[in-house]
Amino acid sequence: MNRREALSSVALLLGGTIIGAEAFLSGCTTSDKKIGTAGLNFSQDDIAFLDEVGETIIPATTTPGAKEAKIGDFMKTIVTDCYEEKDQKIFVEGMTKLEEASKKKNGKSFLESTPQQRHDLLVDLDKEQKDYMGKKKPEDPAHYFRMMKELTLWGYFTSEIGATKALRYVAVPGRYDGCVPYKKGDKAWAT
Amino acid sequence: MADNTFDAIVIGSGISGGWAAKELCEKGLKTIMLERGKNIEHIKDYKEANKEAWDYPHRGERTQKMIKDYPALKRDYPLNERNLDWWASDIESPYTETKRFDWFRGYHVGGRSLLWGRQSYRWSDLYFEENAKQGIAIDWPVRYKDIEQWYSYVEKIAGVSGSKEGLAELPDSEFLPPMEMNCVEKDVAARVKEHFKGSRKMIIGRNAHATIPLNGRQCQYRDKCWFGCPFGGYFSTQSVTLPAAMKTGNLTLRPWAIVTKILYDKDKKRATGVEVLDAETNKTYTYNAKIIFLNASALNSAWILMNSATDVWPDGLGSSSGELGHNVMDHHLGVYASGEFEGYLDKYVYGRRANGVYIPRYRNFFGDKRDYLRGFGYQGGASRERGPQVAEYAIGVDLKEAMTEPGPWYFGMGGFGETLPYHDNKITLDKNKKDKWGLNVLNFDCELKENELKMRKDMQQDAREMLEASGLKNIQSGDNEPYLGRGIHEMGTARMGKDPKTSVLNKWNQVWDAPNVFVTDGAFMASAACQNPSLTYMAFTARAADHAVSELKKQNL
């Protein structure tokens, strides 16, 4: 029985949710976390981990980042419902691989790393995926970090935050102008 | 009048069925419109119309479960998270394939009028005459002069936007103001015109959108057409023909009514009504009428005829010619080319135009002669993609900022090719497979043949040539899976003609063997041309309804 299941049992015994359960859960030290071991069940730790991976890819600037757009939940949903089995496996194993790469490069888990360490690690992984994806045969499996990056970009820019704050969106344009001035720095239309 | 007796029955509520109901009701006929699927009320039932991508857990994309549940629909874009319940279920309504055919159906009130691409083009005599001139299939029993006034009639009501071009091959419609080309499209159009010395033209797409207020409807440039438009921005049964029919007080709309056969009196040589299976209760009903309009969509209209009057003709009503279910046509799609247009980085667009540009057919016209018959048109457009198109940004702030700005302009186009009417491209009843209601399903045995495959080579090469002439860079082109059905323009299964021995319908869309049955969906088409066909169905339907009422008054039916 893992910690989460234990807590759930307690909650059941008491007939409800434990107040502060999330805080309790996250109270364990980050090094205790076993990222990617829940498989497609995606533990809360996995979601938190994916939120930070996404935030490192699309960080908060003057506009919110991927974490605020709940990118971890989004990745979980798409991988669970839309990915084929072979890609699900690559993605889930990829979370563990990313952790291992973090320990190897920075001597600590991804979540324990500083934002700069996280950034530098993902720059390395992005180079790795680009090299791999450029050379691989069509039937070879995809690279897990390519998946994480694609899901982050897709999920962020189609989220309400991404589409309306990082980009521009008008629900009812009312007209079409085929040729309007554009100046550098103006945001792109979300769609 | 008994409650199951009407003056007219309309089978199907899509583009042509809606027109039939409107015209018959306005001419004073008590009419029942039968629809096999659920009702969708204008505006009220457009549940997705005001949602955004982020309102959907999968942002509109397909899940593995959807792929499993829709083995045919998954083959192209209709399989999606947002309006899936507006596409027929492949599990409830399966079909069998001797050869692959991608069949995408809308089983609900409004049919595919809610889902169509809205591109609307007239035919000219260059199209009506080609069968006769080339000795292909049979001659059309009508010419442009017979249908011209009916094009005008339906266009003024449906609303078709476009630019007056005065082209012989593609006559102008009664246009509402055209939508605008963007700067890159205008530039490419000018370069194509110059390079090909006017022999190839690029015009703004002609579509059934109210670009100015039209009876309370107006396009808002949201590009959410296929969720149903709360502004009535485009023509659909719900936005135009159904309310007009309802207003007369003569229409009864009956959803969940699967017509299983047309009832036929062999002594009088007339249809007397239809048999209906209630899709919800499985109960059987009969409706009687003096005339019947069959508008169940080309392939299902053939299915109904195949199941009718089998005591007289084993292969069904209209099969005496041997052509019922044959000559299946579609437009063949999937050849494309695109490239990057350098420049205009200080220009952008406002609004989402659900339309593109159109290049009308130029092959085998005006002295041009190829090693295949007929030709193709292209639809396309230019847009400014978002973000950098080179992978120079890894992750982080730089990537984010780059992805929030528009990138370079791209121009792309895809071909719409004519398919010839081949007798051996056919559908038949498959008596070994049943649908959810225990009814025989259709089997498909249709394919593209040499003429179409030769045409596709030209289609790709010409597209590249035009993009090169327009100065585009990094041009890519290809030919994707040429399967019939993808055009969602099924036609030809009950063609009209001059001779009952070689055609199912006469020139007024009447079944030769039952003149009070009119088939006015895509089934009547004797050839396919290469432009989008719905406007032509509308015009022929209005013309047939006018003829039907006139004949009824003369007591000829």
Image (cartoon, rainbow, N blue to C red):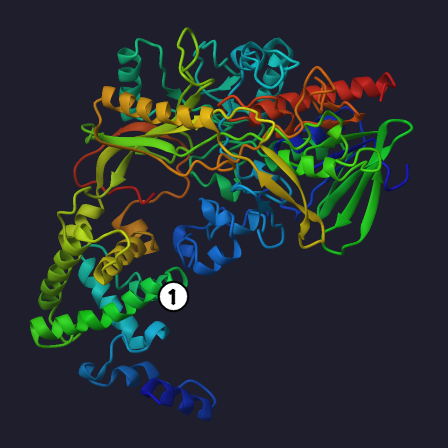
Q: Is residue A69 visible?
A: yes
Above or below, A103 relative to B126? below
The image quarter containing residue B188 is top left
Residue placed at 12% from the left, 56% from the top?
Answer: A127
Whether residue A158 is situated above or below residue B128 in the rendered picture: below
> Mark 1 highlights which residue?
A80
Amino acid carrying mark 1 in the image: Thr
Left or right for B160, reference A101: right
Total numbered badges shown on the rendered structure:
1
Query: Which residue is pictured at 31% across the width and 45% down the height?
Result: A190
As drawn, is B216 to the left or to the right of A29? right
The percent position of residue B397, horizontal first and vertical second, equals 15, 54
In percent of width and height, residue A88 lies at 33, 65
The residue positioned farthest toward the top in the image shown:
B367
Chain identity of mark 1: A
Estimate the x, y position of residue B187 in percent, counting from the top left: 26, 20
Q: For the N terminus of chain B, which image quadrant?
A: top right
Placement of A168 over or under A98, stated as above or below? above
Question: Is residue B282 found left or right of B77 in the rendered image?
Answer: right
| Closer to the camera in the image, B359 or B443 | B443
Image quadrant in which you'd find residue A103? bottom left
In the rendered view, tell whether residue B6 sits above or below residue A21.
above
Q: Secondary structure at mark 1?
A: helix
Indicate the quadrant where residue A8 lies: bottom left
> What residue do we see at 13% from left, 51% from top?
B398
Q: Position of residue B200 (x, y in %)?
A: 35, 14
Task: Count neighbours of disc 1 (C-alpha within 10 A) and say few if under 14, some if 14 to 19, many if 20 or more.
Answer: some
Q: Quadrant of the C terminus of chain B?
A: top right
Residue beneath the point at 22% across and 33% down:
A182
Q: Is residue A59 visible?
A: no
